[in-house]
Amino acid sequence: MTATSTHTAPILRRRPSGPTRRAARALLPIASGQAIWWWLAPVVLSVVATGWRPAWLDEVTVSLWQFVLYAPVVASFALGVVLVAVHLPLHVANGIDRRSFTRAAAVAAAPAIMASAAVAAIGFAVERAVLVTAVADPALVERHLFTATDQYGLVVVEMLVAIVTAWTAGWLVSVGYYRFGWWRGTLLLVLVLLPTGVVQLALSTGRVLGTDLVLGASGRVAVAMAVVVLMAVVVDRATRGLELRGTSTWQVTG
Amino acid sequence: MNTPATVTVTGATRDFHGSPALRGVDLVLPPGRITGLLGRNGAGKSTLLSLLAGRRRPTSGTIRVDDGDPFTDAATIQRICLVGDGGGDSDTSRVGARIDLLTTLRPSFDPDLAHRLLADFDIAERTRIKSLSRGQRAAVAVTLGLASRCALTLFDESHLGMDAHNRYVFYDALLADYVAHPRTIVVSTHHVDELARVLEDVVVLDVGRVLLHEPRDEVVARGAVVTGPARAVSGLVAGTRTLRTRRLGNTTEAVVYGDGTADVRQRAPAAGVDVTPIGLQDLFVQLTMKEHA
């Protein structure tokens, strides 16, 4: 037995007190970093197009920025998947309970989601001011909660709901595959896609399952939010009972 | 201060697709002890450790670490650390980044200890985990496990793949940090004799059940190798639990285990036979072979 004495230097870095805060601190750079990546390509392309300004751009009558809005939604779905598949096992293996992790992930993703909604609105504003000069009111190809690209408040609301829905759906899909494996996980996709579709329809056409909602924008948002809250409750429940596979997962302490 | 944890397992079973991995395990691990968890492949060691760490839930029965459920209780989970064998084939993180992460996540994590141990293992912190050899990844894993200073620290074959030098660095570091910062430690291993000097208690699992749970010294004292003339040996060990008997010509070697071993030792000189101690690993092998026979 060689019991040498150990001297432990004081730990100078302040650590957050609760598990939710600690996990949120660890996840914040991941969520924010991913948000930067998902906006990088559209923003760079827009800046290049603005500077280059090809002749055909002046003849464009539809909003180009509206197509960019798919990027944060899809990327948010991917973030939800990655959080469960990669970061949940790592965090639980390192002392964070599943419930705290779920809360922390939501806290960490919130700034990225809110910033994305803001960038979406700013993008429309920039497009109206700089990019498109031939038309005063760039057309929208698809139906949205907003009917013109200068309805910035509605743009922000729609993007917030759409991104949160995608994030939640990604999380649920990932939980399904992690918990139930490939085949049963794939079957469960239907249960995730259904509410996601309802939210998308409520935000866009205003028809849900063939029925006109006969609601204004606030009513349609309320329907969408109700579905999102339901999905969030399922996320919390499903994650709380999630077992980790094996004891030797890819993380070194795991 | 992270006080050592008490582990209480009551009637724990765990099935995988209908196949039982643990069958009614009852176990109490007192606080502040180093326990060796021994068992053959498939005995249920990793399953038991994953239940203690809150990775999985028992199919039936209960697991308590102090008074908390390690699967659900936030305060309990942060007091537990389960260290695997390193894994990490595809982990692109740098070793230093993992230290930063654990410094954030674990209130008791000591980054200075982690830095020192990595230096002892000769591992550069800027290296990506996937670039390390299996043994080096195991060294990183035990480093992070020790530096986590958790009230309940579980090593599941963590030092598998480490070379002999690094295994001894690990054993020394384990003891040193345990003395400085007492905690409850469970080490699952197949390097039984190597680790025996570190262990205070021994739990032997066999086909999902606890075969024995005793202090190491008592386990070793209960076993002995009796060698001598065949008739003398058979007469001496009669009535004592004999795990194995080998005969070469007129000489017999018997491995005995149990309360009668002390009596065998006492009567051996008069019977003209030799009684020698048996190593923990040999004893474990004989015990588990006997149970399967």
Image (tube, coloured by chain):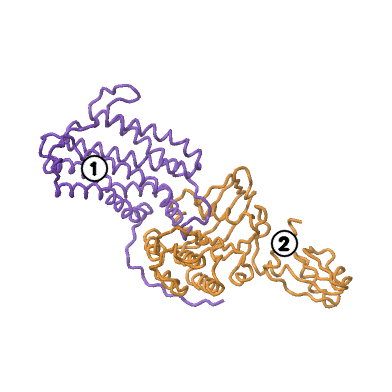
Chain colours: A purple, B orange
User: Toward the viewer: B114 or A61?
Assistant: A61
Image side of residue B153 versus residue A80, left or right? right
Task: Report the number of numbered marks.
Answer: 2
Q: Please, which chain is the residue tagged with disc 1 on?
A: A
Q: Position of residue B38 (x, y in %)?
A: 63, 61
Same chain for the residues under marks 1 and 2 in the image: no
Amino acid carrying mark 2 in the image: Leu
Amino acid carrying mark 1 in the image: Ala
Question: Residue shown at 25%/50% (left/top)?
Answer: A40
Q: Which mark is residue B287?
A: 2
Q: Which mark is residue A117?
A: 1
Image side of residue A149 versus residue A80, left or right? left
Label 1 packing within 10 angstroms: few (<14), some (14-19), many (20+): many
Question: Residue shown at 79%/64% (left/top)?
Answer: B242
Q: Position of residue A65 (x, y in %)?
A: 21, 40
Instruction: Say if B128 sits above or below A155 in the image.
Output: below
Q: Are marks 1 and 2 in contact (CB under 8 Å)?
A: no
Label 2 packing within 10 angstroms: few (<14), some (14-19), many (20+): many
Image side of residue B281 versus residue A184, left or right? right
